[in-house]
Amino acid sequence: MSKAKQYATEGVVTFLIGLVLWRFTGDVDVPLVTLTKVGVVMMVVGGVLSANGLRHAARGGT
């Protein structure tokens, strides 16, 4: 698997997990963290990974 495809796949999966956390864990109480905020952070990280995968694909990286 090329780096571009790997980054894009990891980014999409991370984004989707973050979306699920952000959308459906509003009523869950966990000490130390808020799961909705963790979901937002994961969506941002997933977006950055996906953008990195697109950049690698555009530059023809392996």
Image (cartoon, rainbow, N blue to C red):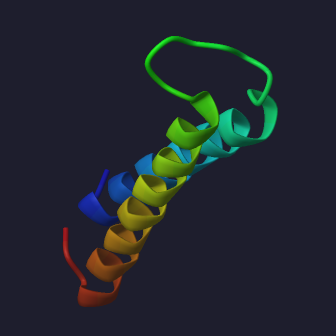
- Which residue: 40% across, 77% down? 54
Spot the residue most to the left: 62
- Which residue: 24% across, 88% down? 59
In front: 43, or 7? Answer: 43
Q: Where in the figure is residue 32, as x and y percent of width and height?
A: 43, 18
In front: 46, or 37? Answer: 37
- Left or right: residue 55 versus residue 34 is left
- Left or right: residue 34 versus residue 51 is right
In front: 11, or 3? Answer: 11
**Relative to residue 18, is residue 8 depicted above or below?**
below
**Relative to residue 15, is residue 47 depicted above or below?**
below
- Left or right: residue 35 versus residue 53 is right
- Which residue: 46% across, 55% down? 46
Q: Quadrant of residue 34?
A: top right
- Which residue: 28% across, 58% down? 2
**Relative to residue 46, is residue 17 depicted above or below?**
above
- Left or right: residue 16 versus residue 24 is left
Q: Quadrant of residue 57?
A: bottom left
